[in-house]
């Protein structure tokens, strides 16, 4: 795989010997494959993985309200109320990607952003990093949606943020982002 700047940092050296690493599927969106690993008891096993581009999730606050987007997710066939999010492009930090995604998806610019947390996601099968960024000091800007983005911007009272995040239907990035920001005393 080429280093397009969108993938996670190189993996750490393995604690268990990797006898073979193979890519079996490659798209512009993800790479899938396996590592043949020698386990501590001497047996070997294929550990399958899918590698996704590094992503950012934005917790944006303005006037005691949380900025969210509502969009249909064809993968699960449901409309979700979720935090703005997107891919970290080549050469971008999590905070710069958050500023860009917030502007593109919601039409808001932030005067201040800070990285709240960086995590590995679904580590039993994914190679995927996600950063959660807090954004504040929002001012109107031009919205610039991608060709495949059909969404509506929504603002909810901060006092309702945790309940809204936990209400069905929901997703991991929204729940995690709101709970992290709430734990930090930002909501």
Image (cartoon, rainbow, N blue to C red):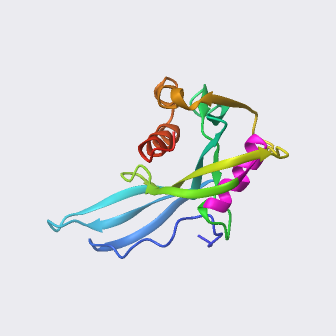
Query: Which residue appears farthest toward the front when viewing the image?
Result: 63
**Taking the image as drawn, is residue 161 in sight?**
yes
Task: Please say if 86 is above or below 92.
Answer: above
Give the position of the N terminus as an image quadrant. bottom right
Determine whether, in the image, residue 153 is placed left or right of residue 134.
right
71 or 30: nearer the eye?
A: 71
Residue at point 14%, 65% (across, down): 41
Residue at point 63%, 50% (across, down): 135
Query: Which residue appears farthest toward the right when viewing the image?
Result: 142
Residue 56, position as x, y percentages in the image? 59, 53
Residue 64, position as x, y percentages in the image? 62, 34
Residue at point 38%, 71% (across, down): 20
Q: Give the residues in magenta.
A: 95-110
Determine whether, in the image, residue 137 is placed left or right of residue 14.
right
Residue 163, position as x, y percentages in the image? 47, 26
Task: Please say if 90 is above or below 157.
Answer: below
Residue 106, position as x, y percentages in the image? 74, 41
**In which image quadrant can residue 5 be found?**
bottom right
Determine whether, in the image, residue 127 is placed left or right of residue 78.
left
**In which image quadrant can residue 149 be found?**
top right
Is 176 covered by the magenta stretch? no
């Amino acid at each position: 795989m080429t280093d397009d700047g969108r993938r996670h940092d190189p993996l750490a050296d393995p604690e268990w010997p990797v006898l073979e690493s193979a890519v079996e599927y490659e798209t512009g969106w993800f790479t899938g494959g396996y590592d043949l690993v020698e386990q501590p008891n001497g047996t070997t096993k294929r550990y399958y993985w899918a590698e996704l581009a590094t992503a950012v999730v934005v917790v944006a606050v303005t006037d005691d309200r949380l900025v969210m987007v509502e969009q249909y997710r064809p993968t699960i066939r449901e409309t979700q109320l979720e935090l703005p999010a997107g891919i970290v492009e080549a050469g971008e930090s999590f905070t710069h990607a958050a500023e860009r995604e917030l502007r593109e998806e919601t039409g808001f610019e932030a005067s201040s952003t800070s990285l709240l947390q960086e995590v590995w996601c679904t580590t039993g099968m994914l190679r995927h990093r996600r950063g959660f960024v807090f954004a504040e000091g929002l001012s109107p800007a031009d919205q610039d949606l991608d060709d495949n983005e059909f969404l509506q911007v929504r603002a909810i009272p901060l006092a309702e943020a945790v309940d809204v995040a936990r209400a069905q239907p929901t997703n991991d990035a929204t729940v995690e982002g709101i709970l992290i920001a709430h734990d930090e005393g930002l909501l």
